[in-house]
Image: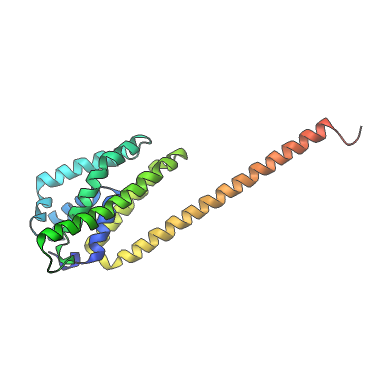
Amino acid sequence: MDPRLLTLPAAFGLAGASGLNASLPLLIVSLLARAGLIQLAPPFDALQSDVAFYGILLVAVVEFSADKIPALDSVTHVLMGPLAATSGAIVFASQAGTIQRVDPGVQVVLSLLLGGGTAVGVHLTRATVRPALNVFLLGPVASTVEDALSAAFSFTALLAPLLLPVLAAGAAVGGWALWRRRAQRRAADAAMRQWHAAYAAYYQQVTQHPPYR
């Protein structure tokens, strides 16, 4: 296996990316392996077969499309939950060198717990937040951002895992900045509504009881 894959940042980065998009990390792993940019050890080299690649591609297209439709995206999250856990476990387990001198059975359990657990945690977070974003018609935007982050984390984990902390920090700062900007906008809108309400009350009072007659 490519030595660049034998790092914990790569394993957790791919697992987290699976939580953002269940099929995209597997598709990227398959694509890069087919292009000869990475090498996968058995049995994970099966991901680069034609059947695996086109099967994952079909699932990725369906997930990408359905996740952009409000209400349907919540159904997709429920259906894709098990796939996210499976995908996270597979991509984590494909980084076999991250766990040295461990019994294969124990390694499988660790991959399921760490990789699958990481993917499920990220997946549940996005599934919980999405309905609130749909209220403000931001669901498709959030879905696109999640897809972009999933792809970015996957490519970085596979090709430059040491940059993952930088990417994660940048994503966190960007998310915080967007949240703060929206919070400030909501505060400004609330202040404007209060001002309009106060002005309307004052105008009504003046028109009903003018100070000079």
Is residue 15 positioned above or below 97 on the image? above
Horizontal side, residue 7 vs residue 135: left or right: left
Identify the image quadrant of the C terminus: top right
Q: On the rendered image, what quadrant is the N terminus found in? A: bottom left
Q: What is the image's colouring?
A: rainbow
Quadrant in the rendering for residue 155: bottom left
Residue 23 x %, y %: 23, 47
Residue 105 visible in the snapshot: yes
Task: Name the residue at 12% across, 69% down.
Answer: 101
How many marks are shown on the rendered structure? Answer: 0
Residue 157 falls left or right of residue 127: left
Which quarter of the figure has residue 109? bottom left
Residue 13 in the image: x percent, y percent? 27, 59
Name of the residue lying farthest toward the left: 42
- 1 lies above or below 89: below
The answer to whether residue 28 shows anywhere in this view is: no
Residue occupying image coordinates x 82% and y 30%: 208
- In this view, which residue lies farthest toward the right? 213
Indicate left or right for 119 with 47 as reference. right
Q: Residue at x 19, y 59 (%)?
A: 110
Front-lying residue, 33 or 59? 59
Q: Locate residue 203: give its quadrant.
A: top right
Q: Position of residue 162 (x, y in %)?
A: 27, 68
Identified at 64% across, 44% down, the residue is: 192
Front-most of 71 and 171? 71
